[in-house]
Amino acid sequence: MTRQMAAANVLKHELVVTVWRKSTAQADVVFDTLADLSGHPGWGGAEASTLLSVDAPAGPAIAGVEFTSTSEDAICRIWDSSVVTQAVRPATFEKVTESRLETKRKGSPAQWLMVHRYEVEPDGDRSKITYTCRLVRANALPGSLALYGIPVLRSLASREWARPSRAGLRRLVAAAEAKPRA
């Protein structure tokens, strides 16, 4: 990745959200949808409400591939620099992302380090996809994102974080299911 985060971590513990969904698409089709980075804007990426752009090498992503993207959600604008850390067809696709975000309301900046992991389990000619997002490091939790730093509100904030993750996973499943069967 092109940047290194040097700021202190405001998190006392990693924040983790895991969601899953079954699909009528075969596991290899789901994996191929994930590994086609240039196709991510078509389904939006499970981790973003709106994926605006992806700058990635052509062809299926393999471990070590680096790429950048921009996205936004209801709270923030986000600039990402990612590296694929695992790409084991058809079972695992993982990337580590350094995010620079800015709140839309006040422009408050933050830098986050996240790990996005997709596990795809074959189930006959179908599959089960599990998406786990880990917020490993953050130098700030601006605006309403500060809820993640308050222990008593963390579970509520995590449930809210799971909502767009589930929506993104639904879009991934729809994209994989729209591909012709082999």
Image (cartoon, rainbow, N blue to C red):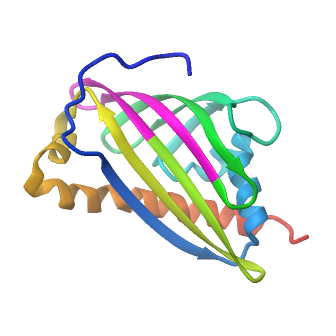
Corner quadrant of residue 127: bottom right
- Residue 173 location, quadrant: bottom right
Toward the right, the furthest residue is 182
Residue 72 location (% of width, % of height): 43, 38
Left or right: where does residue 74 sit relative to residue 155?
A: right
Question: Which corner quadrant of the image does residue 129 belong to?
Answer: bottom right
Tell me where residue 21 appears, x and y as whole percent.
Answer: 54, 73
Image side of residue 136 versus residue 148, left or right: right
Q: Residue 153, relative to residue 8: is it above or below?
A: below
Q: What kind of secondary structure does the magenta stretch mostly adopt?
A: strand
Give the quarter of the figure containing the N terminus.
top right
Image position of 171 with respect to 23: above or below: above
- Give the magenta-colored segment's residue range: 93-114
Magenta-colored stretch includes residue 102: yes
- Number of labelled discs? 0
Q: Residue furthest bottom?
A: 124
Was residue 12 drawn as part of the magenta stretch in this picture?
A: no
Please indicate whether residue 127 sits to the left or right of residue 116 in the image. right
**Quadrant of the frame with the C terminus:** bottom right
Given residues 34 and 89, the one toward you in this image is: 89
Q: Is residue 48 left or right of residue 102?
A: right
Tell me which residue sits at (51%, 57%) in the image: 168
Residue drawn at 18 percent across, 42 percent down: 144
Q: Residue at x 27, y 57 (%)?
A: 158
Image spot of residue 38 (x, y percent): 72, 39
**Residue 156 place in picture, x, y as percent:** 19, 61
Q: Quick one: 179 or 115, which is closer to the camera? A: 115
